[in-house]
Amino acid sequence: MTLIGALDHASVLVFALTGALVASRAQLDLVGFVFIACLTAFGGGTLRDVLINREAVFWIADPGILAVPTLAAVLVFFTAHLLESRYKALLWLDAFALAVAVPAGVAVALDAGLGWPVVILMGVATGCMGGLMRDVVCNEVPLVLKQGELYVTAAFAGALAAVALAGTGRETALIGCAAATFVLRAGSVALGWRLPVYRPRPPRDGLR
Amino acid sequence: MTLIGALDHASVLVFALTGALVASRAQLDLVGFVFIACLTAFGGGTLRDVLINREAVFWIADPGILAVPTLAAVLVFFTAHLLESRYKALLWLDAFALAVAVPAGVAVALDAGLGWPVVILMGVATGCMGGLMRDVVCNEVPLVLKQGELYVTAAFAGALAAVALAGTGRETALIGCAAATFVLRAGSVALGWRLPVYRPRPPRDGLR
Amino acid sequence: MTLIGALDHASVLVFALTGALVASRAQLDLVGFVFIACLTAFGGGTLRDVLINREAVFWIADPGILAVPTLAAVLVFFTAHLLESRYKALLWLDAFALAVAVPAGVAVALDAGLGWPVVILMGVATGCMGGLMRDVVCNEVPLVLKQGELYVTAAFAGALAAVALAGTGRETALIGCAAATFVLRAGSVALGWRLPVYRPRPPRDGLR
């Protein structure tokens, strides 16, 4: 398996688990679990492949990968009740998924010979869009929009790291990308790391 | 007209009617009706065509089809008030639309020579995505997510039937697909057929 | 710069400003501003390019354009508090953006030699979809759906004007398109122009 293939498989697996967990929160049936798992797992990568006009979307080129979200959804359907906190599991799995999906997006964009601004955007979009589709469809508040959490920022920093390290070799760049993304996202979830958010001006009377 | 053309036209017509009904629930103006009707009618098939990289999206290859959702939207705008229950009409029209859109997706995927897992996913996506876009844009609870209703499941069973019957000839497979989808969806709407949904574990104290 | 390039740049700039304003209403951090600005700025044009199968999406063909929404987002992040009313600024910028995005969509569709029904739909979709994605992702009520406002209708009238004027030369057609779109949308925002919306039938007892 190529490196891109491995990243795609890993990201599909972990995003599928998050999709199935969100499906469990929406109390869907088993086929609903598989549907949301596929949407989440394939959303980002499919967008990436359509945008850069790859010959075929990755899961059409390699249909065997469809077994991954299907099995993940079945697994979650029968075991999610064993989890202490489904939301916590969701957050951490989503952080892992982000940290493999961003390098998966970056790698395809680098291979296609695209310039660095497009590589960065493609990394961010591949990383964030699957989870965004999951949350929009299931009516959850998108993780991307959680105030004061590093999410898009983590993806952006990871993609930036990949571009900065591109001269040192492909593997190094992708590992640095995954590490930067995960560390920032994990720091945000566990330790509350954040960037300043936009605040509307204080009220006119200055009382606050 | 080819079989695929006929299925695309039928699915466009019926999905457009559902889109216009949802637009009536959102109290849009006439052009808004046409917009939501087009989104619903073309959403699933457009996604299918983009994903499998067809030469041209079906409504660009055959622009005459744009008259269909336009006329459907005008018709609904002026007659929806005659309906006893718009929601009931919406549910049943949507069931019909699903039952023609799934075989429309399956047929294109089969013609493109794709493997059976992709054929199934393409049938489900073509069937469900138009209605999903309609509901997300119009802020309705997506029919796909209604707890304990067969929706994705009906689409999945239909696509599965098509794959199982593929050896017996294309027409049989597509008819079987439409029939399986419609029977399951109609059974769910009219008779309450359902699959078990995910239930969170009982509370720890066992009192329930 | 070609005419299409100029229209794309103008529409990217103004839509990016609207995206950043919506991000300020959601109180995101700086990278979140850039993300929503890019989504809004590139959403409609990207959809257009994918649908008509252009060789490359416009921001991949010309990556320099990525600087535009980035700078726009930074600008809004640091200055939005100076605005008297962010919502009013949003409404008017969105009206400008619509009035350049519709001709941008129409121009590409005309150059691709598509028939007039497709040209109209492409103009409407390019104009409306970026803002629609912004509003759906950020959980705002989509401007497209605001009852009794001319929005899709303004885009539709503009695209219609372009098709009607196509015989008089490309520049005239696109200017007419922008003018018609803006006048109708501005009239609706400022003066309350509207089309009759769908009204459910009066209650049975006839009391109203």
Image (tube, coloured by chain):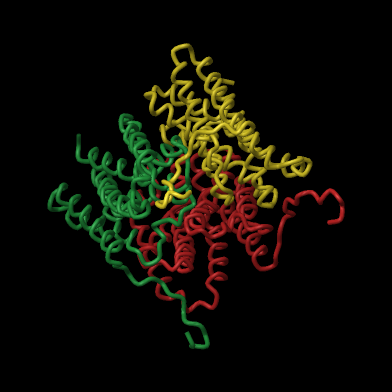
Chain colours: A yellow, B red, C green
Q: Nearer the viewer, residue A183 or A75?
A: A183
Q: Establish if A30 lies above or below C63.
A: below
Query: Residue C88 appears in which quarter of the rendering?
Result: bottom left
Above or below residue C136? Residue A182 is: above
**Identity of the residue furthest to the right in this view:** B206
Considering depth in this image, is A207 or C114 the residue closer to the camera? A207
Residue A65 visible in the picture? no
Between B59 and C75, which is closer to the camera in this rendering?
A: C75
The C terminus of chain B, quarter of image: bottom right
Q: Residue at x 49, y 52 (%)?
A: C139
Residue C154 visible in the shown view: yes
Q: Quadrant of residue A92?
A: top right
Q: Is residue B93 above or below residue B120?
A: below
The spot of residue A24 in percent (x, y) is: 69, 47
The residue furthest left is C168
What residue is drawn where x is 20% and y is 37%?
A: C2
